[in-house]
Image (tube, helix red, strand yellow):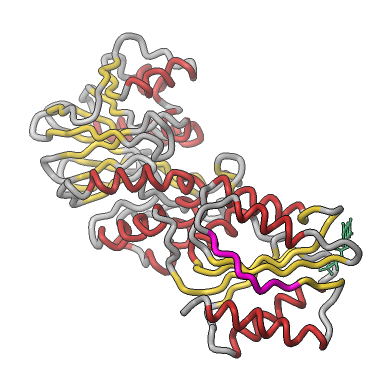
Amino acid sequence: MYCVREITEDLYWVGGNDRRLELFENIHPIPKGVSYNSYLLLDKKTVLFDTVDWSICRQFLDNIKGVLGDRPLDYMVINHMEPDHAACIEEVILRYPDVKIICTDKAFMFMNQFGFHVGDRVIEVKEGDTMSFGKHEVVFVSAPMVHWPEVMVTYDTTNGVLFSADAFGTFGALDGKLFNDEMDFDRDWLDEARRYYTNIVGKYGPHVQSLLKKASDLDIKMICPLHGPVWRTDLEYFIDKYDKWSRYEPEEKGVMIVYASMYGNTEAASEDLARRLVEKGMTNVVMYDVSNTHVSYLISETFKYSHIVLAGVTYNLNIYPPMLNYLMDMKSLNLQKRTVAIIENGSWAPQSGKLMRELLDEMKEMTILDEEMSISSAITEEDADSMDDLADSIIDSMK
Ligand SMILES: Cc1cc2nc3c(=O)[nH]c(=O)nc-3n(C[C@H](O)[C@H](O)[C@H](O)COP(=O)(O)O)c2cc1C
């Protein structure tokens, strides 16, 4: 049984949802599932835009058949070769052996590397190439490293639809709703969209910026990404989020406190700081225990807030391992432009403050506040002034 949605005249969503997968890329938890989007255009020629993950291949093939009926499939545009989108290429070829594949030279190279047997049906395209399918004419726009190097996006000049590959994607299954105006995106989807962007594409901010620049020359009326909702209203809202995230600009003035604590003393110090911040008027404070929050959530929140407090114990003369993992992830995702305050803890040779500072120094445009707390095992009444000074210096740095 097929299950599709009509997007606009001649264009259908033929993707599907996976609510069984626990870890996206075998790393990131996806408690709300994920959608794999594929689109089918019925013009004089029939054109499929990308395929889907292997897990939903059967539904996908039913969907294609349901929309095509007895028509052949003439073209398959492969914007992105990552297996969660490209896995079903060979299955499509098996059913529609005359199909031609349109993709970049690098995508073709990846097809060979992944062992796909695509024969001589590939038409290589590059930046600015166009192709007409009848009524619809498309232009191909390269988008290298908007996740992978082979990526392109395809813009339909006839109806203003942008097939944006992983750009503008989000985690989350679609629950029957496909369009952004069928849901409360800000309430129900934004956090997962941010978590998707920051963890999956976050490292490549400059590349996203260059795609946004190219996109600003196009009259985009609809965005069809490979995951999550299709955008047909309020496009500026989401483009603005992407612009902020890819420039590493925080979305909100606020303080995110991330603490690493075994016995609760560093946690107590963090609670004390949070209380002082709120009492001094900074109420936009969130706290996370680094040991029980998956790092993908920490990264997402770090992209959101302007100020970060790292409060961590010393562990075998090093940074506590989950805190180290978070900091390494932050660094590898190219996070920058944040103000950071440090609280260290140790019972005999506290080191975590110095080591966290060294790691932060390796990141770009990070402001580390001079005011730093060093706790010997637990805070006492004597630490009240220092804690207050730390809260003051965080608030001062927000002005
Ligand atoms: C395995 C282990 C290794 C530790 N290594 C150090 C260390 O190298 N230097 C130090 O000063 N304290 C070290 N500590 C002590 C803790 O950092 C210290 O007791 C801290 O106050 C605990 O804070 P918490 O109550 O927030 O867990 C270690 C503790 C454990 C369990």
Query: Viewed as shown, does residue 62 lie left or right of 32?
Result: left
Query: Viewed as shown, does residue 313 lie left or right of 40?
Result: right
- The percent coordinates of residue 5 (x first, y second) are 29, 47
Residue shown at the point (28%, 31%) measured from the top left: 48
Q: Does residue 302 lie above or below 58 as drawn?
A: below
Which residue appears farthest toward the left when viewing the image? 135
Residue 367 on the magenta span: yes
Q: In this picture, which residue range is highlighted in magenta?
A: 366-373
Which residue appears farthest toward the top when viewing the image? 120
Q: Nearer the viewer, residue 344 or 281?
A: 344
- The percent coordinates of residue 395 (x first, y second) are 55, 81
Residue shown at the point (33%, 48%) measured from the top left: 209
Which residue appears farthest toward the front when viewing the image? 370
Point out the image quarter for the N terminus. top left
Which residue appears farthest toward the right when viewing the image? 348
- The percent coordinates of residue 117 (x first, y second) are 42, 13
Q: Does residue 46 lie above or below 27 as drawn?
A: above
Q: Does residue 276 lie above or below 127 as drawn?
A: below
Q: Quadrant of residue 96?
A: top left
Residue shown at the point (15%, 45%) measured from the top left: 9
Q: Quadrant of residue 184?
A: bottom left
Query: Viewed as shown, does residue 55 lie left or right of 97?
Result: right
Residue shown at the point (58%, 58%) measured from the top left: 297
Secondary structure of the magenta portion, mostly? strand
Total numbered badges shown on the rendered structure:
0
State which image quarter holds ligand 1. bottom right
Q: Quadrant of residue 377?
A: bottom right
- The percent coordinates of residue 376 (x first, y second) are 86, 72
Residue 207 on the magenta span: no
